[in-house]
Every structure is written in structure tokens, then in C-alpha cells.
Amino acid sequence: TSLKAIGVDFLKSQNTREHHTDGYNTKNLVVRRGQPFKVQVSLNRELNSADKLSLRFGIGENPTKIRGSLMSLKPEREQDFNGWKISMVKKGDKECVLSVTSSPNAPVGKYTLNVKTGSHIYKPENGVIYLLFNPWCKDDTVFMPDEAQRKEYVLNDTGYIYVGSAYNIYDRPWNFGQFEEFVLDACMYLLEKSKLSLANRRDPAHVSRAMSALVNANDDSGVLLGNWSGNYRGGTAPMDWIGSVTILQKYYKTKKPVSYGQCWVFAGVLNTVMRCLGVPARCVSTFNSAHDTEENLRVDVYLNEAGEKLNWMSLDSVWNFHVWNDAWMKRTDLPDGFDGWQAIDATPQEQSQGVFQCGPCPVKAVREGDVYLPFDAKFVYAEVNADRVYWIVKKVNGKDKYIRVGTETQDIGKNISTKAVGQNRREDITLEYKYREGSKEERKAMERACSFIRPSGLTPRSGYARTMDQNMTTNNPVVLHETVTKSGIRLEITNTEALHPGNPLELAITVKTSTPGSWTIDLAGSCQLQYYTGKVQANLGTIKETIRLEGQSEMQIPMKIAPDAYMKAFASVDDEVLILVTAIAEVKETNDKLTKETSMRFEYPPITIQMPEMAKLNQDFSCAFIFKNKLNVALENCKLLVEGLGIFKMTTFDQGDIMPGKIMKSEVICTPTRLGEKKIVAKLISNQIKGISSEKAITI
């Protein structure tokens, strides 16, 4: 009788344990490239030396050997095919075990396995194998030598995204959930949708660039629709997500963009996609991130005489924070020295080669000022290195006149942050992105970058500024310096009481002088509510004072905003808004001008989570959420969002209104389906507040 295969066992539990893929919630085999896995083939009779047996792995629509999309592996003869290897491990009377090692630069994706014996082809059920990048394999371009880093950047399915402002950074828990049901399938669907050639699917640089394009819906009906309008009807407000799982599952089911995302949502989802495909990745938050429309390393801020920022005039902006991702890989397409972390960004801000995509850009290229390197290094460099120039717009004889009141060269790209490896704390990685401010290496990198980016002359760049005095205009490039004043004047902005919604905002501007002499200072201060993108939402109040200081001294000027002045605007948007305080000081004696701005976030009472520290697999336990409204305002239309990967599916609970002083208590029953340390994440949202979240860990 002719030899026939009658069954294939993919030895899933052994293979996935060895390949660190046992977390994936799928019935198919998931393995990583460049590493051996075993399959057991059952036959209709004993295998003898004259028999021809081959395993055929095909990828794509109609795989062929000539295109490299069909690997035909013959254990008895051709043991190496396109870098794939096969060997016979064990031969029984009606079965054999084969070991297969894919090439460490094989295209990633879905492969179909058939067993060919003579002219007979056997197609096993669930015969699709998912092949991923392999950070454990030293010949893979994504190889990461450190085990603790692999655990964090590839296998950790929870984490934090850092948000807020440079003045107060806070962590937002995020469930990446790369192992959850349908998430891997969604990533495979994105790979197919990317239309990347097989050759480009071998390369993490091409794959990560394609994914940065597909996570936003611009151009290609990708995963998430961006919306910064403040109106999120017909979708989920960006603040209301607590992880990527719901988003990717919904996208995979409908194949239509999910509404809505802002930068941390795009970064959270892209992080999930990269980790899911096996590329080490981390979310990176930059505070005071420049979104510069002309790559000229300068952001112009326009103020009226009261010190209020004018939205409508600015072409470019400084976001309080912006979140993108770093992906880890060797850059085989670049000269030596640019391997390691590469910045990629899925937030649709600017087109690159005609598509909303950004990166991979070597972080080392940003640090060295090598901004000509692909991809999008100029854009990323400007985000963390631009200068901020302040202009006051005054009406003179019915015309706008622009007066430059200060330059900040060290204010952009602060506190670049990511979650620390193996710890629940923030790690500051600013020095990976740039040399210490003021060091000679930093100056060298800046000069290098400026030879590729032309910083423009010092003219205001708003569309309305064309009418300005000609004598101020210099068109040759200028390297800007921090404003230094003869009076040694400095400004500091602080809050003197906790910033609780419903209470007065108690703020202070401190004016300091450090040079002998007596100084008369005109101080203007303003308070505004702003979105995290730097866009002003409401003007709350201004102060104007003239003060006198002698020599080295300081004076604190209080500024108080009543609740009525901000609560209506505060509750009218579905975003978390920040408090922006801007101060302008003019020294009469020397004509020195100086400006300073600080963004602060509101503070909220916490959610407390009560649950056991340990629980057993498949044994229910209860988890309670307690929240006391310590604010002076009622929280209307409250919703509690709860998700715990492997213990509790994402659910939203309506809680109605919570009056001042009242306590909300809610309880859920959790069923653990996976072992290890798991986390429950809870978030409370209402008309008035968006940003209260909490988490607690449990060992299963």
C-alpha cells in the first residue's frame, strides 16, 4: 500500500512552552522563527527507506517554491530549504516525530502545513501555524539579550502610560492584552491588509512602519479613528478606554475603524500589536512635545497683553504630553551604530511618504542629531528638541504688532518616560533621546541637526503676522538662546492648595530677582483650561500688578479662580483638561521681558480595590470597588469600567450620580482562567471627571 499521513499532532503544550507562546488564546500552534518545534505525524503503515515524505509550509494565497512562499522539507534528503531545517527525531511503527526549525529571517505570518507522501497530500485540521518574530533567537533582528527586558517588553500584557504634565506626571494603567482571544488574529489581518511583500515581512523595520500606519484609520481604514474635538458622540471617548483588547476585538469583528482614539490610545494599541507579533516594544511619553508644522525647530506661542494664549493664531503647538512607541531591532538598512530602540508613532499628525505613519526612527539618531536617517528622524527630533518662542500681540494704531518676550530652549522634550523593567514605576529615558541640556555633546548634536534642518529667521510664523515691522526681520538662521535678563528676574508658578474640582483654584506666581538694584515689574498673569494638545478650551481669569523688588528678593502674587468661573467649561467636555497658567513680566528699568507657563492637572479622590492577594485557578473570588466622593460637586452619570486580563472580562457598570460625601461600593465576581500574577484595573468616569483609575494585583 502507498504511504499516507492520517493525522498530525502539533504537540502544542510542549512547543508553546519552549517558544514562550503558551499565553496566546488560540487553538492553533504559535511558534517563533529560528527556533526548533516538533510535530508528530501518524501514518497508515510503517515508514521505510524507499518512502518519500515531506512537510510543506506555505504562506499567502497560492504558495510556490519559486517565490519562496512554499517550503518543502524532506527529512530523509533535503534537510535545508530557504534557511528552514528539518530532521527526524523519532520513528515508531506507524508514526514519526519531526523537528522543524524555521529560518531566523523567515517572513512572519500564517503558514499552512500539509504532509506530502508520494502523490498523496494530507491537510490536517487546524493546520495553520502562526510564525512570529523571536527576541530569544540571537540570529533574529529583534534579538534582545536580557531576559528581564524580554519579560517586560514582549510578554508583559499590562503596564502604564504616563500622562499629565511635566509639572505633575501620573500613570494611567493600560491593559495591552496581546494574548487575548482574537488579538493575534487581528494582528495577522493587519499584516495581510498592509500588502507588505514577503521580503518586507521578514524585516521588523518594514513591519513596524506598516503597523504605525494601520493603527490609525487615516488612508487605510485602520484600527482607530482619531478625534480631538471634545465631542465623542457615536463612539467611545478616548478617556474611556482602559486597554487595547476591546478595540482590537471590535476591529477584527467589524473590519471597520473603532471610534475614538487620542495619542495614548494609539500608542497602547500599537504596543499591543508589536508585542503580539514578537517585536519588543514600550510606550514612551514625552512631556512638552513640540508638534511643529514646518520642521524648523521652533514653536511660536502668541499671547495677548493679559498673558492669555491665543489659539487661533498658532500654526504649531506644544502638547502637554505625547505618547509614541519604541520598538527594538537591528537596522540592517542603516550604517552601523543605529540598532536598538526605534521610535514609531501611530498618532496621525503628519504624512510621511504620503501616508500617516511615523518611524522607525533610531533613538540614537535623534540623540546624535543624525536627522537625515530614515524614517522621519527630523520630525521626532523636532518633537523633543524644538525651542519655544513667545510673542505678545499688541494693537498699535489698529494694527497688530508682535513683540518677542522670551525664548525657552530647554523646555521641550522633558521627562521622557516609560514603565521600568519588572517594576511598577516610571523610568526616565530622556538621556537616551538627548544629551544633557547644555553639555558639549548636546551642542554638537544640535549643530549637526541644524545642518540638515534649516531653522528659520526670527519672524513670527502665524498667518496673521505678515504685517510686522521689517526691522525685526532676520532671515538667516539663528541659534536661539535662553532669555537672560539684566535684572536676573525669574518666574515660578505653583498651586498653594490641592486642585480639587469644585474648589477654588488657588495659584501663585512668584517673581524673583537676583541682581542688585531696585526693580519695578509689571506682571500679567492668566489662567486658562486647556486640552492636552495645548489647545485652549476656556479663559478663566487674569491678574495685573505692578510690584517693586530690591536686589535679591522675591514676592508671591496670589491668583484665585472661583468654582463658578470654571466648573461649567470643565464639565462640558469628555476630555481631561489641564489648568494652564501663563505669566509675563516686564522690568521697567531695563525693558527686560520674560514669560513662563505651567500646566497642572486636577486632583481626584481615589478608588480603593479590595480583593484577596491569592486565588486558585477556576475558583471564583470577589472583588470590591469603593469610592468616596470627597469633592464639593455631585458627579453625574458615573460609570465604573472594570477589566482584569485572565480574571474578568471588560465590563461597564452604571453607577448613576454620586453626591458630595457619598460612597459608591460595587462588587464583582472574578473567575481566574490563567496562572501567574494578574491585575484588575478599574476606572471611574462621569460628566465632571474622567481620570480616576486604580489597579490591584493578585497571584493566581
Image (cartoon, rainbow, N blue to C red):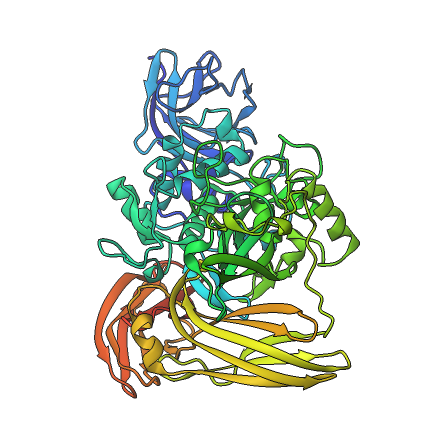
In the rendered structure, the answer to whether residue 86 lies left or right of residue 619 reads: right
Residue at the far bottom in the pictured view: 661
Which residue sits at x=43%, y=34%? 355
Q: Position of residue 510 (x, y in %)?
A: 60, 81
At horizontal 49% and vertical 46% (from top left) the residue drawn is 345
In this view of the protein, which residue sits in the foreground, 120 or 70? 70
Q: Look at the picture and state if 104 lies above or below 575.
A: above
Image quarter (top left, top right, bottom left or bottom right) of the N terminus: top left
Residue 410, percent from left and from top: 65, 60
Residue 451 visible in this rendered orientation of the protein: yes
In the image, 644 versus 236, the foreground residue is 236
Residue 172: image quadrant is: bottom left
414 or 644, nearer to the observer? 414
437 lies left or right of 223: right
Across and down, in percent, residue 538 comes to: 37, 68
Give the image location of residue 590, x and y in percent.
70, 72
Residue 299, compared with residue 568, is above or below; it is above
List the single residue furthest toward the front.
397
Quick check: can you spot residue 99?
no
Name the residue rendered at 32%, 24% in the picture.
Answer: 123
Q: Is the C terminus in the top left, top right, bottom left or bottom right quadrant?
A: bottom left
Q: Quadrant of residue 9?
A: top left
